[in-house]
Image (tube, grey):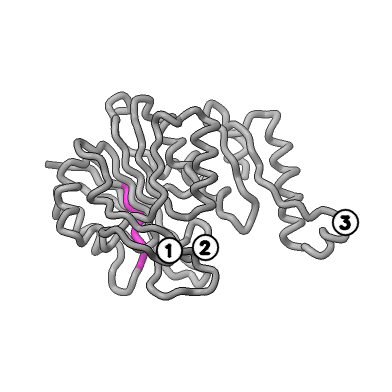
Amino acid sequence: MGDFLEILPFYARRAFLVWQHAQEYVYSQPWKAFIQGKVKRQSFRCRLLGGPKISIRPSPSHDFQTVNEIFIERIYDCELDPGTVMHIVDLGGNVGYSCLFWCGKYPNASVVTFESHPVHCQILKWHVRKNGYGRRVKLVEAAAGVRDDRANLTDEDDGSAIVQEVPAGSIGVRVIDIFQSVPDGQIDLLKIDIEGSEYEILEDPRFEDLAARTSCVLLEWHLRGERGEAFCRDRLSSLGFAVRSGRTSVDHNGQLFCGMLYCSRTH
């Protein structure tokens, strides 16, 4: 919490703590909050110190955790010259924090971001509009895939994933063939965080051509059966990337289920 408060303007710090306490109360004691007339759950909005204007939804959203990962832990930082980065492709845009981070760090860059969750798309658009990045960020409202299709998306906040079955509460979304949709030419940074759908993209023969014109890949791998970090590392290494491991995450049972790979081109 302390680290997050340090990237807020002084005037916003107390407001954030008051907002967080109120939202936690409403979430943990809904009936008592209802009786007291405190039922409104709303987002906290402010501008980060020297950074973008952001919107954070209350729990059970993971927005606060994601803001910490991107703007404090800087998990999407990579060893690229900020002045030379021109083209970024973002598979899995979520609510747009990654776009805001890159637009701030790379002043000459444009971003093409793919996101299918309708709520996330609306928040992403708000972030782009409020920060004046409309000319630099292009949102494709579709899931990243290897063919144009329709699919079911689980409604699990930043863990929403494409599934074959039709679970209760799932959302019908458009899937787009990224190999037909990603712009031609050099890609300075390719981020892939699509909750398990990374494997069909990595396995597609066309990925080799995409990788050949990409300088840096940031990949969040997700354990799916026997496929996980080793599979992704071997695939990217075989395509000429130097690969190093980043942070990993465990589920509520303490089992490893995802992690980051940072990949830079060696030849």
Residue 136: x and y in percent read 39, 31
Q: Which residues are magenta?
A: 218-223
The three-letter amino acid code for the residue at tag 2 is Glu
Q: In 3D space, how far apart are the residues under numbered discs 2 and 3 (Cα atoms)?
A: 29 Å
Q: Earlier in the sequence, mark 3 or mark 1?
A: 3
Residue extending farthest to the right is: 36
* Dot 2 crowding, Cα within 10 Å, few <14, some 14–19, many 20+: some
For residue 259, which numbered disc appears in the image?
none
Who's the residue at 71% across and 43% down the image?
A: 17
- What type of secondary structure mainly makes up the magenta span? strand
Q: Nearer the viewer, residue 68 or 171?
A: 171
Magenta segment: does it hold 221?
yes
Residue 204: x and y in percent read 19, 60
Residue that carries the numbered disc 2 in the rendered image: 156
Residue 4 visible somewhere in the drawing = yes
For residue 36, which numbered disc appears in the image?
3
In the rendered image, the quadrant that contains the C terminus is top left
Q: Earlier in the sequence, mark 1 or mark 2?
A: 2
Label 3: state its secondary structure: loop
Residue 23: x and y in percent read 72, 52
Who's the residue at 33% across and 54% down the image?
A: 144
Residue that carries the numbered disc 1 in the rendered image: 161
Q: In 3D space, how far apart are the residues under numbered discs 1 and 2 (Cα atoms)?
A: 8 Å
Dot 3 and dot 1 residues touching (CB under 8 Å): no
Who's the residue at 29% across and 34% down the image?
A: 87
Q: In 3D space, how far apart are the residues under numbered discs 3 and 1 (Cα atoms)?
A: 37 Å
Label 1: state its secondary structure: loop
Q: Is residue 93 left or right of residue 261?
A: right
The three-letter amino acid code for the residue at tag 1 is Ala
Q: Quadrant of residue 9?
A: top right
